[in-house]
Image (spheres, rainbow, N blue to C red):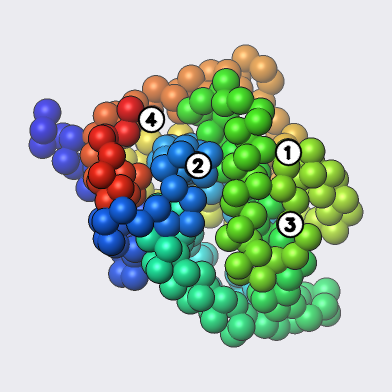
């Protein structure tokens, strides 16, 4: 059993760690940007919820033609979907659970990368990854989907006040990256997304992105069914109107509940195996007992 536990954890860490990751154990006592009592630590603590939320976030973000053009022109995500998810996971983990210095280093690095991501979208509009309005859209799509993943697959009774606290806290990272007028509550995010919907489009590249997600490779053959289930669980987090734009027929209540239960069950071995995830190391840094 110990061998199995180590193998599962190693596969998870291969997705969420890599060169440039934060040192979650140092320096002792440093709470980072949020600290262990924050709603952000709680929402970002579950790998399955964050993975499914990250998949949904990518698809929602790519419905906006300008972020889609930036990703399409300046990354190799078409050939390395897991690499894209890994880089996002490293940034989120580092800014959430890392020391303040590590979080600020990661934010500064992403800001610098954004300065080189410029171009012209197929519709003729110029884009820049450092555009404050585009940064706000990318942030809102991300944190909205992270929260939906946590509610659907981890903690459906997560209190409304804690949900809004999460959105208030995590706005700090968006603003540090250069976003402006960042929505900081569920109501504000719902209103913002409604206002953004007329700007969203689905074209051949968006549909290709969806197919890449559905066909995402697993770390190994044994994990392939698990990975496919997580990808489908992520797609199901999208609002029905976004699924329809992507050509995905929304699941009925019974099929949605079956998928939810399947993802929840598939998450149990991962939750059992994890002892050295970002939150576990961060709690050790703070001198706290293992996560309850």
Inter-mark Cα distance, 4 to 1: 26 Å
Image depth: mark 4 or mark 1 in front: 1
Image depth: mark 2 or mark 1 in front: 2
x, y percent for residue 104: 47, 69
Inter-mark Cα distance, 3 to 1: 12 Å
Instruction: Say if residue 188 shows up in the picture.
Output: yes
| Figure quadrant of residue 267 | top left
Q: Which residue is mark 4?
A: 267
x, y percent for residue 207: 67, 54
At x 67% / y 17%, what residue is drawn?
253
Residue that sits furthest to the front in the current view: 29
At x 44% / y 73%, what residue is drawn?
105
Question: Could you tell which of marks 3 and 4 lies nearer the N-terminus?
Answer: 3
Number of the label disc, if any, that sits on residue 38: 2
As helix, strand or loop, the secondary structure at mark 3 comes to loop
Looking at the image, do the residues carrying marks 3 and 1 touch, with CB atoms under 8 Å apart? Answer: no
Which of 220/276 is in front?
276
Number of the label disc, if any, that sits on residue 186: 1
x, y percent for residue 91: 46, 61
Inter-mark Cα distance, 3 to 4: 32 Å
Going by the image, does 131 lie left or right of 54? right
x, y percent for residue 205: 67, 62
Going by the image, does 141 lie left or right of 3? right
Number of the label disc, if any, that sits on residue 182: 3
Badge 1 crowding class, 10 Å Cα cut-off, few under 14, some 14 to 19, many 20 or more, is some
């Amino acid at each position: 059993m110990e061998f199995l536990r180590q193998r599962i954890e190693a596969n998870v860490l291969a997705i969420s760690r890599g060169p440039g990751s934060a040192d979650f154990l140092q320096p002792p006592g440093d709470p980072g940007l949020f600290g262990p009592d924050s709603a952000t630590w709680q929402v970002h603590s579950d790998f399955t919820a964050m993975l499914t939320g990250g998949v949904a976030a990518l698809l929602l973000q790519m419905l906006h033609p300008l972020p889609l053009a930036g990703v399409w022109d300046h990354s190799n995500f078409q050939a390395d979907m897991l690499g894209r998810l890994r880089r996002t996971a490293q940034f989120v983990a580092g800014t959430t659970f890392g020391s303040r210095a590590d979080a600020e280093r990661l934010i500064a690095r992403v800001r610098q990368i954004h300065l080189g991501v410029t171009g012209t979208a197929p519709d003729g509009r110029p884009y820049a990854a450092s555009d404050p309005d585009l940064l706000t859209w990318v942030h809102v799509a991300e944190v909205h989907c992270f929260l939906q993943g946590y509610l659907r697959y981890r903690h459906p009774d997560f209190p409304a006040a804690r949900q809004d606290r999460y959105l208030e806290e995590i706005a700090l990272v968006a603003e540090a990256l250069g976003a402006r007028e960042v929505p900081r509550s569920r109501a504000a995010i719902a209103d913002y997304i409604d206002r953004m919907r007329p700007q969203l489009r689905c074209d051949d590249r968006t549909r290709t992105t969806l197919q890449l997600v559905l066909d995402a490779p697993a770390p190994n053959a044994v994990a392939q069914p698990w990975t496919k289930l997580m990808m489908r669980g992520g797609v199901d987090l999208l609002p029905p109107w976004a699924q329809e734009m992507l050509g995905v027929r929304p699941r009925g209540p019974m099929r949605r509940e079956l998928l939810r239960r399947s993802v929840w069950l598939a998450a149990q071995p991962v939750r059992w195996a994890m002892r050295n995830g970002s939150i576990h190391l961060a709690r050790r840094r703070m001198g706290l007992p293992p996560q309850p």
